[in-house]
Amino acid sequence: MDRDHFPEDLLEDQTAWYLTYDELAFAPAGSRTSARRRLLELSRRVVGHPFWETPAGTPAARVALKEVARARTKTGS
C-alpha cells in the first residue's frame, strides 16, 4: 500500500480519531461524554469508508493508515 494514496477524508478521520482518543485519555472524569461520542462517530466513519471495499482496502492498508495517521498527530500535519 502506497502510504500517500489514502483518501484524504479517511486519513483526516483516522488522525482525528487518535487526537480524540488522546483527549479522552486525559479528560477529567466528568467531561468525557462528548469525546466518547466523537470517538464512536469517527470509528464508524473510518470502518465504513468506501475505500475498504476496493482492492486496496487490505488488512495491511488498515495498519498503514493507522501508522500514517499516528505520525501526523506527532508532527502536527
Image (cartoon, rainbow, N blue to C red):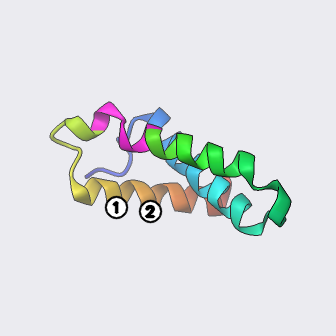
How far across and down, in percent of the image, does residue 13 sit? Answer: 53, 42
- Asked if the stretch drawn in magenta spans residue 48, the answer is yes
Give the secondary structure at mark 2.
Answer: helix
Residue 35 tag number:
none
- Vertically, is 17 above or below 55? below
Choose between 1 and 42: the one closer to the eye: 42
Q: Residue at x 82, y 55 (%)?
A: 31
Badge count: 2
Choose between 9 and 48: the one closer to the eye: 48
The CA span between labels 2 and 1 is: 6 Å
Which quarter of the figure has residue 57? top left
Label 2 Cα neighbours within 10 Å, binned few <14 / some 14-19 / many ≥20: some
Which quarter of the figure has residue 51? top left
Residue most toward the left? 55
How far across and down, in percent of the image, does residue 70 sit? Answer: 54, 61
Residues marked 2 and 1 touching at CB (< 8 Å)? yes
Q: Residue at x 70, y 50 (%)?
A: 35
Q: Which amino acid, by three-letter code, is at mark 2?
A: Glu
Label 1 Cα neighbours within 10 Å, binned few <14 / some 14-19 / many ≥20: few
Q: Which residues are magenta?
A: 45-51
Q: Which amino acid, by three-letter code, is at mark 1?
A: Val
How far across and down, in percent of the image, does residue 11 sit? Answer: 47, 43
Question: Which residue has dot 2 on it?
Answer: 67
How far across and down, in percent of the image, does residue 50 sit? Answer: 30, 31
Choose between 67 and 53: the one closer to the eye: 53
Question: Which residue has dot 1 on it?
Answer: 63
